[in-house]
């Protein structure tokens, strides 16, 4: 009986050990699968972030190009108003250039869908590199700061811009709408511009300031975006 009991006890111990080993193996396989899924998910997010940040570079550069074009029209208008060498036709052309490009407000647009997804779902933790994770949080915080800064500049300029536009009937200069005002006398239009020189330059200066400020902010963000792209690529290649 003692021998049988000993054998049964050893058998039971062996069974327990086999069960424990089986559980440990199953847990290891499950953990490996979970890690594989997590790595795949991280890879997917990183590639999406990479694409969106590269798109942002192009968007920011295009915005800067448009703003620089606006600044050029502002400078041309200022030069035409401050010089006696410009003909009436050239002065009006400079004014139309400003109305078409220089008076347009800067806008901020960026791709944040992937980061918004990471933040709202709690999947930001899938980015295992804590340094990269922190860099992404700071990077997209800058997006919001610049968007807000540009909005503040626009809100500051609008109260000056609206009455200027109305009081000087600048729509009569626009080729698309000047027919509404009847036949336009080029000499009278040029005379109006020269008589209101300070008012026009003051309005142009407002747009020059908000455009230049937006360019400075976007150029800084482009530099930051290149750094994020490098960090993401490094993480993907590791």
Image (cartoon, grey):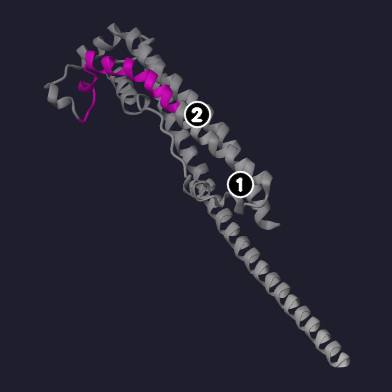
In the rendered image, residue 192, in percent from the top left (x then y), is placed at 24, 10
In the rendered image, residue 72, in percent from the top left (x then y), is placed at 43, 25
> Real-space Cα distance between discs 2 and 1?
21 Å
Quarter of the C terminus within the rendering? bottom right
Q: Residue at x 72, y 79 (%)?
A: 19
For the residue pair 183 and 21, the one nearer the viewer reads as 21
Magenta segment: 150-176
Q: Earlier in the sequence, mark 2 or mark 1?
A: 2
Q: Which residue is mark 2?
A: 215
**Circles 2, 1 touching at the beta carbon (< 8 Å):** no
Note whether 144 is above or below 168 in the view shown. Answer: below
Which label belongs to residue 151?
Answer: none
In the rendered image, residue 108, in percent from the top left (x then y), is placed at 44, 34
Which label belongs to residue 229?
Answer: 1
For the residue pair 185 and 4, the one nearer the viewer reads as 4
Q: Residue at x 51, y 49 (%)?
A: 52
For the residue pair 205 and 110, the one nearer the viewer reads as 110
């Amino acid at each position: 009986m003692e021998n049988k009991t000993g054998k049964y006890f050893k058998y039971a111990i062996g069974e327990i050990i086999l069960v424990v080993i089986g559980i440990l193996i199953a847990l290891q396989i499950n953990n490996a699968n979970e890690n594989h899924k997590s790595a795949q998910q991280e890879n997917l997010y990183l590639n999406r972030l990479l694409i969106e940040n590269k798109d942002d570079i192009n968007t920011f550069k295009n915005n800067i190009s448009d703003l620089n074009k606006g600044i050029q029209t502002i400078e041309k208008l200022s030069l035409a108003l401050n010089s006696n060498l410009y003909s009436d036709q050239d002065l009006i052309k400079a004014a139309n250039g400003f109305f078409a490009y220089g008076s347009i407000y800067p806008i901020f647009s960026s791709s944040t869908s992937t980061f918004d997804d990471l933040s709202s779902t709690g999947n930001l933790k899938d980015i295992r590199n804590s340094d990269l994770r922190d860099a992404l949080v700071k990077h997209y915080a800058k997006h919001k700061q610049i968007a807000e800064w540009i909005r503040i500049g626009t809100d500051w300029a609008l109260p000056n811009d609206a009455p200027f536009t109305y009081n000087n009937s600048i729509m009569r200069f626009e080729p698309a709408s000047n027919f509404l005002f009847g036949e336009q006398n080029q000499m009278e239009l040029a005379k109006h511009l020269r008589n209101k020189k300070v008012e026009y330059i003051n309005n142009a200066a407002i747009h020059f300031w908000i455009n230049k400020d937006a360019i400075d902010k976007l150029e800084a963000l482009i530099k930051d975006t290149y750094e994020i792209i490098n960090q993401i690529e490094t993480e993907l290649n590791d």
